[in-house]
Amino acid sequence: MTVFRSLTRVLALLWAGAACAEPVALDPGDFDEFDAAQVQAGWLLFYDPVLSGNKNISCATCHHPKFATSDGLSLGLGEGGIGLGRARVADSNNLPEQRIPRNSPALFNLGHRAVTVMFHDGRIEVDPTRKSGLRTPLEDEMAEGFASLLSAQTMFPVLSADEMAGHYQENDVSQAVRQGRITGDGGAWDIIAKRVDAIAAYRALFAAFDAGVAGGDPVTFIDVSDAIAAFVATEWRAYDTAFDRALRGGAPLPEPAAQGQGLFFGAAGCSGCHSGALLSDQGFHAMATPQLGPGKAARFESHQRDDGRFRVTGAAADAFAFRTPMLRNVTRTGPWGHAGAHSDLADFVKFHADPVLATYAPQATLPDLSTAVADWAVLEDAGATAAIQMAYQPRPVALNDADISNILAFLDALTDDASIAGRLGVPDAVPSGLAVDR
């Protein structure tokens, strides 16, 4: 029986590794360079709560270097939260309506030229057939002129009631969003841009690199978004890892990490999806990842499930499929999974290789929220769980404890400590005078 089990495991590993990719170092030359003044403007705006409806949340609130450009939570609290990271709590005087439905993704290498999709479901992606060159939830109403995909991505969290905009009648931004006024004069983006334009220090920064602003034109939200994108693309480039250095001819990886790399790019089959220099195929896969929290639903829907890529494409094959994440600094960016269902990376790797939802034991990192819906409603629904399990695409791979230990050692070799801290760090203050999360 022992021999049979061993042979079965070997065959499964070999099958999984049959079409795996080869390791590729990340080339620092595959990133664009930006004007230093534009990067500085984006740096300050990224940490400035002036972009949020109630002027109480910045981009950094949920993407902070203290938490490797995430927030350390499975599902975070945006509007209505107080504090930073795992210390963030609900404001008893302004309770959040719900948790943010998906785990806050890390920001490393988003400025790489090979990145073609953003968000867990890829709802913003490069699409040359569209007038704007991008596919977004706004479809043909999407404004044109963004410098990059990353720039377009930054424009959407400010529209989310749960993330940055605020709810209903709380402020002028949330009211505009509620009324469907996003683009154009008086739209949500225009309201935010006018706030920035009214601050002399920001106008001076933009005038240093933008001829239009220097000539008297107002700062637009596309200007704001382009600047934030320039900052993110510059600040969190992660390519100086032990893995990348070894591939460029530097010191070889220590034995456990080398063994893990062999498994990753071989028998364990990880690189079937985590391929290329970014360790992501930029694709979408249904991996039977546990779901929790409010899920993703339209206002007229009452379910708590998250259909993933299906919500974007409507294609049955995309049900419960989520984007393959890039992996630089992955050991620092937990909890893991599109809903942060795993707070232990070893458990996540083991589950990810052979996902059986019936075996999952909840280990999420969640702040208390009295207004939250039942966090585990989907996994307690046999029908919903069965649908997620049935959508699972790859063949499972059985990994033993030694395999998992070696794979974790390899994943740790993908760490670039300097990139986590960032090149500019956290500013002491921002031009609006509002408080900086630190």
Image (spheres, rainbow, N blue to C red):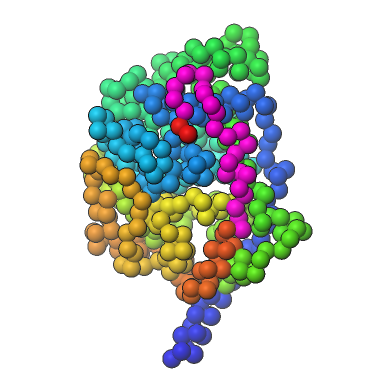
* 99 relative position to 222: left or right: left
Q: Main secondary structure of the magenta part?
A: loop
Query: What percent of the width, then of the height, locates residue 59?
Result: 47, 33
Residue 15 makes an appearance in the image = no
The image quarter in which residue 243 lies: bottom right
Identity of the residue drawn at 69% across and 34% down: 33
Q: Is residue 48 magenta?
A: no
Residue 170 makes an appearance in the image = yes
* 35 relative position to 58: left or right: right
Asked if 418 appears above or below 264 in the picture, the reply is above
Identity of the residue drawn at 33% across and 48% down: 366
Query: What percent of the width, then of the height, locates residue 147?
Result: 60, 30
Identity of the residue drawn at 48% across and 39% down: 63
Q: Nearer the viewer, residue 295 or 35?
A: 35
Q: Is residue 418 magenta?
A: yes
Farthest top residue in view: 216
* 248 relative position to 263: left or right: right
Number of residue marks: 0
* 243 relative position to 381: left or right: right
Q: Nearer the viewer, residue 300 or 70?
A: 70
Q: Magenta stretch: give its range.
A: 413-436
Query: What percent of the width, then of the height, locates residue 327?
Result: 56, 53
Farthest right residue in view: 249
The quarter in which the N terminus is drawn is: bottom left
Asked if 91 appears above or below 252 in the picture, the reply is above
The image quarter in which residue 336 lies: bottom left
Identity of the residue drawn at 62% across and 28% down: 39
Query: What percent of the width, then of the height, locates residue 154?
Result: 50, 33
